[in-house]
Image (cartoon, grey):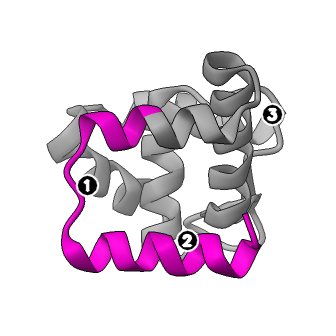
Amino acid sequence: MADLSDREWMVLSALWDSGGDTLGGLTEALRPEAGWSRNTVLTYLTRMEAKGLVSIDKSGYPHLYRAALGRADCQARERESFLRRVYRGSAGDLVAAFLKEQRLSPGEREELRRLLDEMEV
């Protein structure tokens, strides 16, 4: 699966949040963020079905659209792709860069220590 575009993420997020929806429902859900018309949403759904990202139940009317992939699976693929492209696969470099740029709360530091201890790093 190729990396998802921001717009594909937006559509999939709406489908994950709803658990599946009609074209009208998705158009309404996406309108505040994207401002898309019904035709634009339908175009995305049709293209995403061809890519295997969306399934369409055409047994009833209106048709029901669902994400064909789970959120966790897509997140894992995106993390792997990002790590490979930006940090040459080095999780340590990613974590180090993040920690240099972001402040962690005491609770977050403790959780990170716990996770590292569990991994026996």
Q: Residue at x 24, y 59 (%)?
A: 104
Q: Residue at x 26, y 55 (%)?
A: 28
Q: x and y percent of residue 72 in the render? A: 66, 65
Q: Which of marks 2 and 1 is nearer the N terminus?
A: 2
Query: Between tags 3 and 1, which lies in front?
Result: 3
Picture quarter with the C terminus = bottom right
Would you say residue 47 is visible in this rendering?
no
Amino acid at dot 3: Lys
87 displayed left or right of 106: right
- Location of residue 87 with respect to 29 vertically, above or below: above
- Foreground of the two, 120 or 88: 120
Helix, strand or loop status at disc 3: loop
What SS does tag 1 mark? helix
Alpha carbon of mark 2 to alpha carbon of mark 1: how far?
13 Å
Q: Distance between the residues labelled 3 and 2?
A: 18 Å
Q: Where is residue 19 in the image (x, y as percent from the top left)?
A: 54, 76
Which residue is depicted at the point 51% across and 43% down?
95
Secondary structure of the residue carrying numbered label 2: loop
Q: Residues within 10 Å of mark 1 (few under 14, many from 20)?
A: some
Look at the picture and state if 5 lies above or below 54.
Answer: above
Query: Looking at the figure, which quarter contains the N terminus?
Result: top right
| Horizontal arrangement in the rendering, residue 79 relative to residue 21 (left or right) | right
- Residue that badge 3 annotates: 51
Q: Which of marks 3 and 2 is nearer the N terminus?
A: 2
Can you tell which mark lies on residue 20? 2
x and y, in percent, of residue 42 in the image: 52, 37
Q: What stretch is highlighted in magenta?
A: 97-121
Name the one closer to the observer, 25 or 73. Answer: 73
For the residues bearing labels 3 and 1, Cβ distance under 8 angstroms: no
Q: In which quarter of the image is residue 99?
A: top left
Quadrant in which residue 85 is drawn: top right
Residue 113 visible here: yes
